[in-house]
């Protein structure tokens, strides 16, 4: 196992208040125990990311810490549904077409966050004469409770699932969910061997850890963590080798959980389509030689940085989506790839300009600034993509009428 230098706190990150410090203390202590419980004092990065984001009551998404929204000075990041309800209303047009095609009124949303997307889609479907059966599958109990509270006033038929449906017909939506699934980190070393990255306690913090236990104290210093690596197992070697040649020093990630999720969809999505919105690109771009540090990013109060081992439980950790891998995984689950394009192109095809003329949006500077963010190439319009996969949908989907880029996957 090779050691890497420990992570440092990037300059400019806001200082932690007392509550945040106490929470970081609890999460770090938990992670330290998990590392110590492993035979080799090492946990693979995907396990680390999973716990830092989703450990019940502790992880970033599971402990009341998630701060959606640009309007909050303490917000961490902003998603399209949080920017403006026009995003959800436009998406609803595509959802309505899929519902008609699948002869169903059921929408299944994964990872609904604050509930903003559902709050826009449901009234928009009603305006189109569809009273939806809306289902949400959310891994975070904390966010599920927030969604239940926030959406109650709609008086809609909404239920929360705890597992995949056995059989489903209708429309699946997932906005920025694939990017929040834990990734495996890898690096090609100087000898051309593939290494898997993981996390261990930084040498100095082994002493801190003793102090934490001895005092059973909340004021003990935070344990600190560092990257370490081990030789990749044959399964990981096979997967990475299919995607890129060995490039010494090149580090990146692979989202095996998201791929399994896509493949599994093929077993329960019987008729209809899934609309997957996220930032990312096709595989050729993802593993481009120039992208030699991968795409892993962290978000803390609108500061983006690349240190996932700090502020455990307080910051979002995310990676871009390899849309070629997602499409391949859907195909191997027996689904068809129905469309792939940029967010801007999708929203224009689905009728955002038309919706703008029906509202007072054009005279509202805040809404216009949000729309500009959604469409601008320099903001979300080009980096964000929409991938549609499904089964039993005969008509071309309206969101991909022009500018379908399936040939680039
Ligand atoms: C970046 S947030 C996006 C929230 C919301 N969709 C939005 O766009 O504002 C990621 C969401 O996905 C959820 N999530 C992550 N993995 C999931 C999974 N495998 N199944 C369901 N939800 C998941 C998180 O708990 C969180 O609600």
Image (cartoon, grey):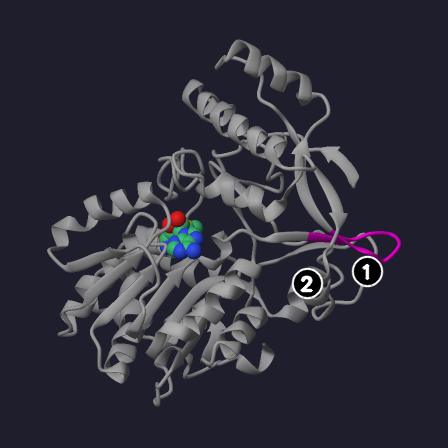
Residue at position x 43%, y 64% in the image: 277
Counting from the top left corner in percent of width and height, residue 142 is at 32, 40
Q: Magenta segment: does it hold 194?
A: yes
Residue at position x 34%, y 49% in the image: 113
| Residue 79 visible to the viewer | no
Q: Residue 33 lies in what quarter of the image?
A: top right
Q: Start and end of the magenta stretch?
A: 186-195
Q: Magenta segment: does it hold 50?
A: no
Q: Give SS at disc 1.
A: loop
Check the image and name the residue furthest to the top. 215
Label 2 Cα neighbours within 10 Å, binned few <14 / some 14-19 / many ≥20: few
Q: Give SS at disc 2.
A: helix
**Residue 327 shown left or right of residue 296 in the figure:** left
Q: Which residue is mark 2?
A: 235
Judging depth in this view, the residue of 180 and 56 nearest the camera is 56
**Residue 157 shown left or right of residue 348 in the figure:** left
Whichever of callouts 2 and 1 sits on the residue coming sooner in the sequence is 2
Q: Which residue is mark 1?
A: 247
Judging depth in this view, the residue of 149 and 54 nearest the camera is 54
Say the numbered circle drawn on residue 239: none
């Amino acid at each position: 196992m090779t050691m890497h230098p420990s992570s440092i706190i990037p300059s400019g990150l806001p200082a932690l208040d007392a509550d945040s410090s106490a929470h970081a203390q609890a999460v770090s202590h938990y992670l330290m125990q998990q590392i110590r419980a492993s035979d080799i004092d090492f946990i693979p990065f995907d396990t680390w990311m999973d716990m830092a984001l989703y450990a019940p009551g502790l992880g970033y998404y599971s402990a009341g810490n998630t701060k959606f929204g640009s309007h909050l000075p303490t917000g961490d990041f902003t998603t399209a549904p949080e920017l403006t309800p026009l995003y959800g209303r436009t998406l609803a047009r595509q959802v309505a077409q899929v519902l008609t095609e699948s002869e169903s009124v059921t929408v299944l949303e994964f990872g609904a966050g604050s509930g903003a997307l559902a709050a826009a889609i449901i009234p928009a479907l009603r305006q189109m004469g569809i009273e939806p059966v809306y289902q949400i599958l959310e891994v975070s109990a904390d966010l599920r409770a927030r969604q239940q509270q926030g959406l109650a006033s709609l008086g809609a038929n909404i239920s929360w699932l705890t597992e995949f449906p056995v059989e489903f017909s209708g429309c699946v939506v997932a906005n920025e969910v694939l990017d929040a699934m834990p990734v495996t980190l890898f690096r090609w070393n100087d000898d051309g061997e593939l290494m898997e990255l993981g996390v261990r306690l930084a040498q100095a913090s082994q002493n801190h850890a003793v102090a934490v236990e001895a005092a059973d104290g909340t004021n003990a210093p935070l344990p600190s963590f560092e990257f370490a690596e081990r030789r990749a197992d044959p399964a990981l070697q096979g997967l990475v080798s299919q995607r890129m040649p060995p490039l010494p020093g090149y580090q990146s990630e692979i989202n095996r959980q998201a791929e399994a999720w896509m493949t599994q969809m093929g077993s329960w999505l019987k008729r209809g389509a899934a609309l997957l919105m996220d930032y990312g690109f096709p595989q050729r771009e993802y593993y481009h030689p120039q992208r030699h540090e991968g795409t892993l990013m962290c978000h803390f109060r609108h500061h983006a940085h690349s240190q996932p081992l700090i502020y455990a439980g307080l910051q979002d950790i995310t990676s871009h989506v390899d849309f070629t891998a997602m499409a391949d995984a859907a195909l191997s689950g027996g689904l068809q790839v129905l469309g792939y394009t940029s967010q801007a192109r999708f929203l224009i095809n689905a009728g955002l300009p038309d919706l703008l003329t029906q509202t007072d949006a054009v005279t509202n500077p805040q809404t216009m600034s949000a729309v500009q963010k959604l469409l601008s190439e320099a903001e979300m319009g080009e980096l964000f993509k929409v991938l549609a996969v499904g089964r039993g949908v005969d008509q071309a989907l309206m969101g991909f009428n022009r500018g379908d880029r399936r040939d680039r996957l």
